[in-house]
Amino acid sequence: MIHLSNRINQLSESETLAMSRKSRELKAQGHDVINLSLGEPDFYTPDDIKKAAKIAIDENYTFYTPVNGYPELRKAISQKLKRDNNLDYSPEEIVTCTGAKQAIINALLCLVNPGDEVIIPTPYWVSYSQMVTIAEGKQVYIEAGIKNDFKITPAQLENAITPKTRLFMFSSPCNPTGSVYSKAELEGLARVFEKHPNVYILSDEIYELINFNKNHESIARFESLKDRVVLINGVSKGFAMTGWRLGYMASHIDIAKAVTKLQGQYTSATCSIAQKAAQKAMEILPEDTWVMLDKFRERRDLVLELMKDIPGMKTNIPQGAFYIFPDISSYFGKRNGEHIINDANDFCMYLLNNAFVALVPGDAFGAPNCIRFSYATSNELLIEAVKRIKSALSELN
């Protein structure tokens, strides 16, 4: 018998990856599955970025790089943060990582001690909670329901903070809800954090460029908090570069040095070619990515309109990312023959097996009454997916 560590035994499999795996298994059996479980743009990486990578290969950028990334890449990120966000971070305050996911776990491992409390608004991105488990912290959840557009209030934040609170982590635009915090809403949260100087803030901004308001706001803009903010971003979503695995964080120099020390012991730097591609991405102006943004907005509107014909499915109107996060609790207790819908997991498995549409149950995001629907695919597939969902749900009673 193999005895694994308590650390891995306490960890759950990523639900988004699990649903994607199940959909691949059904496809291998010959079924026509529409996979709406993964958060991945269906666009190709822009040609200028691919060209930069090819040039880097030809110019032999194939050796180890500094752990925190090439200086010229970190300078390009610094310039991007100033140009697009009016944020002042020196290249020394920036660390590049193997995806934004690694940047987040790096920050947690450098800031959170065993037993420290980490506040997470729900719904949250699927890996936040599990990453806190890896760091041996304690999750403290704040529920942000659909009635509040899945956003928390300053009063809720104030009530959640205790002397043991070490970190607050959130995303805007949000995965899985698509909700976006406005400048005024962020300012309300900032006023609370100002009263609690020992609390750090991890701001996941990976969907910055998929913001239908075309005006991204960062909580790092408040000077009183800047030294305590760890800003997370990358190239996967806004530049359709998921497979390149390049994320970055910007933070106080002491945190950046700590993350560099940590990363140096378990992965070192991320791919040299991906770094040169990302350097080119940082030169691209936000408005030059709006073709993809406008397409996502069109798909959002299409799916929301189609969902109006499905009884009992409550939605908000997402202002960013490429997800819809409907409340489907009205279907709990319904059945089709032997299949009973007791929860969101049953709901998703029913649709996977009967409609061949892969979605993700909301339990994985801390919202057990909801499911995540990714519309990062073609209009034709979205129309067909909703048609199948509507038909399968109509057979429940």
Image (spheres, rainbow, N blue to C red):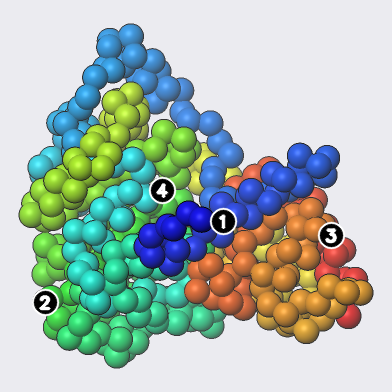
Q: What residue did someone put label 4 on?
A: 209
Residue for point 24% across, 59% down: 109
Comes first in the chain, label 1 or label 2: 1
x and y percentages locating residue 127 in the rendered image: 43, 60
Local secondary structure at mark 2: loop
Q: CA distance from mark 1 to mark 4?
A: 22 Å
Residue for point 11% across, 77% down: 197
Q: CA distance from mark 3 to mark 2?
A: 52 Å
Comparing 10 with 135, the one in front is 10
Residue lying furthest left in this view? 254
Q: What residue did someone put label 2 on?
A: 197
Comes first in the chain, label 2 or label 4: 2
Q: What residue did someone put label 1 on?
A: 16
Q: CA distance from mark 2 to mark 4?
A: 30 Å
Query: Would residue 173 be found to the left or right of residue 17 on screen?
Result: left
Query: Would residue 55 be found to the left or right of residue 314 on screen?
Result: left
Residue lying furthest top in this view? 58
Q: What residue did someone put label 3 on?
A: 354
